[in-house]
Image (cartoon, coloured by chain):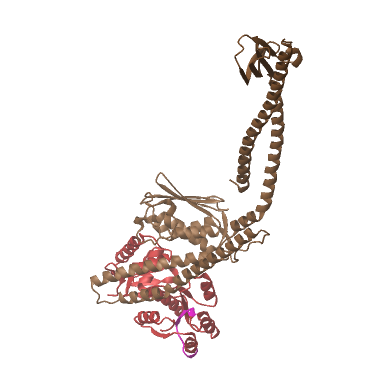
Amino acid sequence: MKILLIEDEKELAGSIAAYLQKENYVCEMVFNFSDAIEKINLYQYDCIVVDITLPDGNGLKVISELKKMKSGAGIIIISAKNSLDDKISGLEVGADDYLTKPFHLSELNARIKSIIRRRNFDGNNEFVFNEIRILPENMEVFINGDSVILTKKEFDLLIFFLSNKDRVLTKESIAEHLWGDEMDLADSFDFIYTHIKNLRKKILEKGGQDYIRTVYGMGYKFSGL
Amino acid sequence: MKLLTKTSRYYLILSGIVFIVSGLIFYQLLQRVFYSQMDLALKDEKELIEETINYSDSVPDFRTIFGHLVEVTILYDPNRKNEFIHDTVMYSSEDGKFLSYRHLFVENTSVHQKGYTINIYKPLHETEMLITGIVIVIALVFIALLAILVAVNYFISRRVWIPFYRILSHLGYYDINREKPLELTKTDIYEFNQLNEALEKMSNKIRQDFINLKEFNENAAHELQTPLAVIKSKLDLLIQDESLTEEQMQLISSVYDATTRMSKLNQGLLLISKIENEQFPSAERINLSQVIEKTLDHFGELIGHKEIKVDSKMDPSAVVKMNRILAEILITNLLSNAIKHNLQSGSLDILLTAHQLIISNTGQPLDMDPADLFERFRKSNTSGQSVGLGLSIVRKIAMLYHMQISYQYFNGIHSLLLTFA
């Protein structure tokens, strides 16, 4: 999988690349508009992560350029501008998703995976991890062939975990993934604990393994054993 | 008190005092003039009587001569000498009441070495009536004059102060948030033009400062986004390190929490400055009950987790004209506030009518001044993770759309009332 990262803030670009490389993606970085145009004209990518405000141009133009080339790459906008206009115009020119800075790397990773999955399997995808088999479109989960009934949040949680296997997921990133930005409720973390407890119980009941580990005060980790 | 009322009142009080004092002086003077006139007449009569006594050594009936009471008696002690004039009161059988008189009394000796006494009584009530008549006429003229003066003064003042009232109403309608600087119309009065100039200068300075502050707020919040994103991403990488000890992990966890708070704070401030800068222009008709239903659904699991009993009575046709995003933020903040500060197994009541939304919830009594509830960074000690911007954002949005927001606490129930036209 090849990913192009267009981000003028070098430190941030470095972090994103480091995180994605652990997922065995090939991640290339450019820091300005002209380099980005050059890269997309020369190479094919599976996914492009683009910042809207670049020193020498607008990230939205990169997206229109890609669309002109009929590129099949998935596109995610990352922007410091938490403005609706950017979001709407970004999605209008053909971006697949939109993330506002600051974001969790695990969230970006999950979004990239979701886009790549949708593109590669035309929606009829399933993904399998050991004894767990998931049909994302139908929201169905099977363990050892047995169907497991999960709530919407438990299902989202499982997908988020599987997209970030062997990574420590902070409570904050899980809360934001499940409830979005406006989640400012003090007791939401207890609530995450309840969801995780239920998810773990449902997997164990069907004879699945216990993959979810607690990481000190930090969060949780879905480890592949 | 209005300026015109105040000046008219002072004018009336001062003129009244002057009127009363000068009236008293006038009355005194008038009385004195009449008395001296009368005393002269009394002395003339006395001289006439004395001459008659000296000439004829007999006492005629002076009463018929002068037309008022005159008593003349021959004294046997010729050495007594006395003369004075004073006021006196005597019973008049004619009128059946006491009347006041001017009384001249003389004891003297005639040419024929005989002592005599003269008493002349001149009635005063006619003079008094005359004085009273004069005073009443003068008073009436004076009062009429006063009334005319006050009225004239009132109308002149009203005319003169017209530009002032125009300036006042201009200032009242002036909104510092609006694009245009304050512009006041010129007048033909020097002082008011000076006032205009001073006000324009001052308001321009305030407006410039206000714009700078708003720009600074937005820029500062904006510029903080990138470093925060860098810190967050580096922390995300750092926690993946398998070799971290538990102690190190605790340290990172603290940094992580602080960063998350800072980032939420920053987003809140950015949102507030965007509302202040009116960067949410598009308004549409929003059905509030739909937004509330959607938000309640969003918080459904949390409400269930806290076992909060929700009771909503909503008018499905309640509509407000506002930006959709802001409407959603408004409702989300109000409801999340009511859930966050609620008790375990508490209640949440929503009442929506055509012009009012009331959200009431059970909860601990407020541990701060209710007046500070909508201020930035005011939060109760119990809300932990909260950054204290939620209700301040609510107020900003309410202000933008001229809605009124107020808070009430009664019997363990907190209520937030949002009134919209």
Which residue reaches farthest top?
B76
According to the rendering, which colour does chain A have? red
Residue B358 seen in render:
yes
Q: Colour of chain B?
A: brown
Image vertical order of residue B395 relative to residue B236, above or below: above
Expressed as whole percent of the image width and height from the top left, the position of residue B321 reads: 58, 59
The image shows residue A41 at horizontal and vertical percentages of 50, 89
Count of number-bearing discs = 0
The magenta stretch spans residue A51: yes
Work out whether B104 lies above or below A46. above
Q: Which residues are magenta?
A: A41-53
Query: Is B412 in front, or is B58?
Result: B58
Res. A25 image quadrant:
bottom left
Residue B129: % across, % down: 70, 24
Q: Which residue shows up at 27% across the image and 71% down it?
A: B249
Tell me if residue B45 comes above or below residue B17 in the rendering.
above
Q: Is residue B258 left or right of residue B19?
A: left
Q: Most extreme residue toward the bottom, as rendered?
A: A42
